[in-house]
Image (cartoon, rainbow, N blue to C red):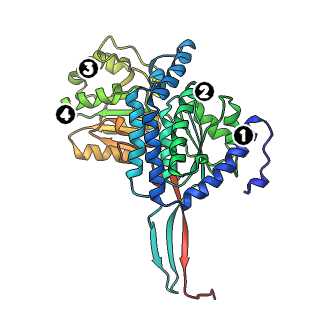
């Protein structure tokens, strides 16, 4: 669809979107032709700007945190919003890591020659203009900008209203780096205010935006899926499970469960439900509960778990469908691998699910039985992260079944086309 054929209602948000979308389209065309070395220089320059502006970014974030606290916010959501010098340094390091990755556009995906002599190649192509709608975590803007730039696409970033100051400061640093490297600053843009009309304008911007990626809670994703007139690369909640099998090494299980739940409770890869095999629950569950309690965790447990540890809070059926994003863990005792798989299929969100066991056959049965975008064996679910996968960063965790699943990195932010080379062939 051509931009001139678009019919979007007028208003500040849609007026901005028309201008921003047109500028992003031009910038994406420049990026698509830009040598990899220049894109990498732009990423490294943006990383340098993040480091140079660390104090101003943290100060802007302090303003967001003050407003968040004044509104009565707290808990894990505050941690998601908070930036420290270490987290700003991690954002910058992420951009450097992306720059060091192979060029996702410099690949040949397939290459064959037909009997008539036509050579057909399938090659990567940038998506074009990506719209990213995300909630509290301000570092998402830097990660998304870096991945889109490396993949040759422009991006319009609409962060959560509670991180507006932080997002603006990060955007200023990133675009400062782009200008320093001679790359188009319009390749990364943010709306000028927190007005929710900008979200509606992005969702209706078919022809201006090629792909919408939401990253946030269930409400955000559901709204995007129901209202978007643009293709969506979405994810469900992070209802992640860790299943401790009867053949689990107890010390390994203790390390993994504590990390999977409590390392950072507010990320989508945090384990929300512990499943423990009935064969080892009487001896191991009290130890796991004690470990987690020492870290500040609370519990919602089924009757079989409470028969072993009597003071656990009873769980409702809805608790097993809840992404806590907090220091709360749902607990259920299961009868073997098949029962664990059935629980995951009934309550999970196809995000990340793990088994802890020394039995390779049981591990394979679990991995084959769950529909998770990421299935893990003897590892913390918190490893479901683009950086940990070697992607440099991620733009989100895709749980759908079209185009991409799991951490969305550079390869997942490209599409493809065909290049056909002949020597005079005509079709009979």
Quadrant of the drawing holding the N terminus: bottom right
Under circle 3, the secondary element is: helix
Q: Nearer the viewer, residue 312 or 78?
A: 78
| Mark closer to the chain start, 2 or 4 | 2
Percent x, y for residue 49? Answer: 46, 39
- Which residue is under mark 1? 16
Say which residue appears at 47% left-offset and 41% top-offset: 143
Which residue, given by chain and number where applicable, does mark 2 sit on?
A: 161
Above-or-below relation of 302 to 365:
above
Secondary structure at numbered mark 1: helix
Of the two numbered discs 2 and 1 in the rendering, the one whose residue sits closer to the viewer:
1
Q: Find numbered disc 2 in the image and state the secondary structure of the residue it sits on.
A: helix
Circles 2, 1 touching at the beta carbon (< 8 Å): no
> How much space separates mark 2 and mark 4, taking CA atoms?
45 Å
Q: Place residue 162 in its image quadrant.
A: top right
Q: Quadrant of residue 128?
A: bottom right
Q: Nearer the viewer, mark 2 or mark 4?
A: 2
What residue is disc 4 on? 249
Q: Number of marks in the image?
A: 4
Where is residue 273 shown, x and y percent of the image?
A: 38, 28
Q: CA distance from mark 1 to mark 4?
A: 57 Å
Residue 291 image label: 3
Question: Where residue 21 sits in the image (x, y, percent)?
Answer: 68, 47
Q: Which mark is residue 203?
A: none
Q: Nearer the viewer, residue 255 or 353?
A: 255
CA separation, marks 2 and 1? 17 Å
Q: Earlier in the sequence, mark 4 or mark 3?
A: 4
């Amino acid at each position: 669809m051509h931009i001139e054929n678009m019919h979007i209602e007028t208003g500040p948000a849609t007026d901005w979107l028309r201008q921003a979308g047109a500028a992003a389209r031009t910038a994406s065309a420049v990026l698509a032709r830009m040598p990899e070395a220049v894109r990498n220089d732009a990423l490294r320059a943006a990383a340098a700007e993040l480091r140079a502006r660390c104090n101003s970014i943290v100060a802007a974030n302090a303003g967001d945190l003050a407003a968040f606290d004044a509104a009565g916010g707290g808990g894990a959501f505050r941690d998601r919003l908070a930036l420290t010098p270490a987290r700003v340094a991690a954002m910058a390091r992420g951009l450097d890591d992306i720059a060091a990755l192979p060029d996702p556009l410099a690949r040949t995906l397939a290459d064959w020659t037909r009997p008539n002599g036509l050579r057909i190649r399938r090659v990567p192509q940038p998506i074009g203009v990506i719209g990213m709608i995300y909630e509290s975590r301000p570092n998402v803007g830097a990660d998304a900008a870096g991945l889109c730039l490396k993949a040759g696409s422009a991006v319009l970033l609409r962060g959560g209203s509670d991180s507006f100051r932080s997002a603006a400061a990060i955007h200023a640093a990133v675009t400062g780096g782009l200008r320093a490297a001679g790359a188009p600053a319009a390749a990364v843009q943010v709306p000028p205010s927190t007005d929710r009309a900008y979200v509606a304008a992005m969702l209706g911007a078919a022809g201006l935006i090629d792909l919408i990626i939401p990253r946030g809670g269930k409400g955000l994703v559901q709204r995007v899926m129901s209202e978007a007139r643009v293709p969506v690369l979405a994810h469900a909640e992070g209802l992640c499970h860790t299943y401790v099998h009867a053949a689990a090494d107890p010390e390994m299980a203790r390390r993994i469960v504590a990390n999977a739940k409590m390392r950072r409770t507010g990320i989508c890869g945090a384990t929300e439900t512990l499943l423990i095999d009935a064969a080892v629950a009487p001896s191991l569950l009290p130890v796991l509960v004690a470990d987690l309690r020492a870290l500040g965790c609370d519990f919602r447990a089924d009757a079989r778990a409470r028969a072993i540890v009597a003071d656990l809070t009873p769980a409702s059926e809805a608790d097993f469908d809840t992404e806590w994003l907090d220091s709360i863990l749902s607990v259920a005792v299961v009868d073997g691998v098949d029962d664990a798989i059935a629980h995951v299929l009934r309550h999970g969100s196809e995000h990340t699910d793990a088994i802890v066991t020394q039995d390779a056959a049981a591990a394979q049965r679990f991995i084959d039985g769950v529909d998770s975008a990421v299935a893990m064996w003897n590892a913390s679910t918190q490893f479901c992260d683009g950086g940990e996968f070697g992607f440099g960063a991620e733009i989100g965790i895709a749980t759908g079944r079209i185009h991409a699943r799991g951490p969305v990195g550079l390869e997942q932010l490209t599409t493809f086309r065909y290049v056909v080379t002949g020597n005079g062939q005509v079709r009979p």
